[in-house]
Image: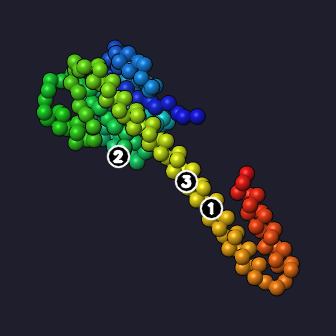
Amino acid sequence: MTQMAKALLVDDRRQNLTALEAILQGLPVQSVAVESGEAALKQLLVDDFAVILLDAQMPDMDGFETASHIKRRERTRHVPIIFLTAADRDAQLALRGYQVGAVDYLTKPFDPWVLRAKVSVFVELWVKTRQLATQSDLVRERDMQWRRLTDAVDEATALLRSDDPEVRDRAVRLLEQARWGNNS
């Protein structure tokens, strides 16, 4: 069964989180809302996310510091971060967001349809990445099965060259085991 993509919503204001949840409603993504950078970092320890919507200006640990911690962790460094802020269009703040690893930086008020479209792209990429990882695992497993079968055939071939009937019988048993072991 395929795991549903999740979006981590981080904002110190509950009403902003509620608004973000409403914007994302209907998309194939589960919203997980937290009210601080610390809570976001804790959530990232237990869940995988397709995208993070992160408020830039929060008390205690702001969005920039939170993003910096996220990007330092091996497990989370590739999760796309979209900064959301009520600050005026300050080029320095946007630059700071990109420097800590953001893929985008939106100022409020933003067009909810644009945000939905951006989140949709990252959710689709997350799903496709998961599918590729699953296919890669299957290919790796098939490759290991193929190697085991090839090794058994090579060993049996060497045994079949013997003049001893017991050794040849062992080769036949080996081939039968390989055949039945790889057809199940």
Residue pictured at 73% horizontal, 51% vertical: 184
Tell me the residue that label 3 is attached to: 139
- Which of discs 2 and 1 lies nearer the camera? The answer is 1
The label on residue 146 is 1
Of callouts 2 and 1, the N-terminal one? 2
- Few, some or many C-alpha atoms within 10 Å of disc 2 (few <14, some 14-19, many ≥20)? few
Residue 169 sits in quarter: bottom right
The label on residue 163 is none
- Few, some or many C-alpha atoms within 10 Å of disc 3 (few <14, some 14-19, many ≥20)? few
Residue extending furthest toward the bottom: 163
Q: Is residue 184 left or right of residue 3?
A: right
Helix, strand or loop at label 2? It is helix
Residue 150, position as x, y percentages in the image: 65, 68
Amino acid at dot 2:
Arg
Tell me the residue that label 2 is attached to: 72
Residue 154, position as x, y percentages in the image: 68, 74
Quarter of the picture containing the N terminus is top right
Amino acid at dot 1:
Trp
Q: Nearer the viewer, residue 35 or 181?
A: 181
Q: Is residue 96 above or below residue 115?
A: below
Amino acid at dot 3:
Val
State if disc 1 and disc 2 touch (CB < 8 Å).
no
Helix, strand or loop at label 3? It is helix
Of callouts 1 and 3, the N-terminal one? 3
Q: Is residue 55 above or below residue 132?
A: above
